[in-house]
Amino acid sequence: MSRNKAETYIPALAKTSLDMPPLWGRLISLSPGGAEFLSHFELPAGRILALTFELGRAEFPDIRARIKTALRDGDGYYNYALVFIDQAQSALLRAALIEANPK
């Protein structure tokens, strides 16, 4: 898993279920197909999350993702490789990424 510079981290809220409080973390990389999420909370691979974050002027509420891998670093943080599972949400994210990073 790669590490981006701290100024590129995107704060994100992760919901794991309706009856649990949301967890906080940061997206350290982001693409239309998935993301890397850094958090202090431990979650197992295979778990489904609903992520909420902002990218540019767009807000992305409850983007559904599955935890592909979960690795703990030496500082006690967990680095999660996520795969987005909703194609419509991925398409909206792709458009926002293109707008945020025009060539």
Image: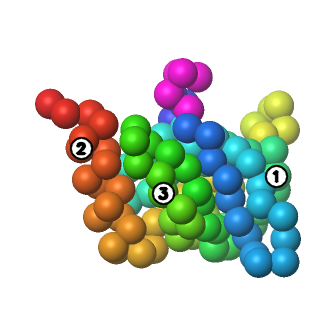
Between the residue at mark 1 and the residue at mark 3, the CA separation in whole angstroms equals: 21 Å
Q: Earlier in the sequence, mark 3 or mark 2?
A: 3
Q: Nearer the viewer, residue 82 or 93?
A: 93
Nearer the camera: disc 3 or disc 2 = 3
**Residue bearing mark 1:** 41
Q: Mark 3 near mark 2, Cβ–Cβ under 8 Å?
A: no
Q: Amino acid at mark 1?
A: Phe
Q: What residue sits 78% from the left and 40% below the top?
A: 77
Name the residue nearer the viewer: 37 or 73.
37
Nearer the viewer's eye, disc 1 or disc 3?
3
* One can see residue 35 in this view: yes
The residue located at (29%, 54%) in the rendering is 94
| Secondary structure found at label 3 | strand
- Disc 1 or 3, which lies upstream in sequence? 1
Specify start and end residues of the magenta stretch as a single range: 5-9
Q: Is residue 13 left or right of residue 95?
A: right
Tell which of 47 and 9 is nearer to you.
9
